[in-house]
Image: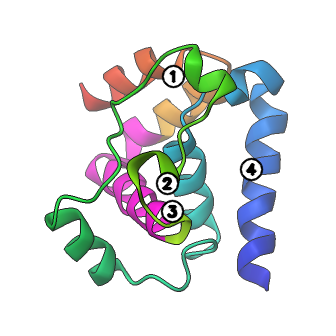
Amino acid sequence: MYFYLGHELSHLLMHQNTGGYAYIKIPSWFHEGLASIVSNGGGAQNITSREAQHTILSGSNFLPLDSAGITDVFLPRYGSYWKLDNQMFYRQAMLFVGYLKYRNMDSFRAFLTDIQNGNNFAESFNKLLG
């Protein structure tokens, strides 16, 4: 049960720090991936990293750069958009956000600060990828 609490509190904190409109402009894969990391797998606890990796290798995965712009504000893309079970989507997003975090911790911190300050997600993401 504490998995879910940590997951949802992560969403709440991000929402409070960014503000309503800026928050909904952040892609769902990032919201869910970060919340799953913070909560030690909350939302994805029934899917292992190995299962997610096999699913990715089989060609069934979300695409982080597949964004429809303003359409995502009204129709956010979750697992079902890519024909993924929600827990699989959360685990894959968790693995991707974890990769970004451990790839360059300082750049990831700067990225989080950027988006929490309301900066454009796509621009901040491009800086992170540098």
Magenta residues? 88-108
CB within 8 Å, label 2 to label 3:
yes
Spatial CA distance of label 4 from label 2 is: 17 Å
Spatial CA distance of label 4 from label 3 is: 13 Å
Left or right of 107: which side holds 85?
right
Q: Mark 4 or 2, which is nearer the eye?
A: 2
- Sequence-wise, the earlier of marks 4 and 2 is 4
The numbered disc on residue 90 is: 3
The numbered disc on residue 11 is: 4
Spatial CA distance of label 2 from label 1 is: 20 Å
Residue 41 in view (yes/no): yes
- Image-quadrant location for residue 5: bottom right
Three-letter amino acid code of the residue under disc 2:
Gly
Q: How is the image coloured?
A: rainbow
Task: Tell me residue 46's x, y (percent).
Answer: 52, 86
Task: Tell me residue 48's x, y (percent).
Answer: 39, 84
Q: Is residue 93 above or below residue 17?
A: below
Task: Tell me residue 76's x, y (percent).
Answer: 60, 34
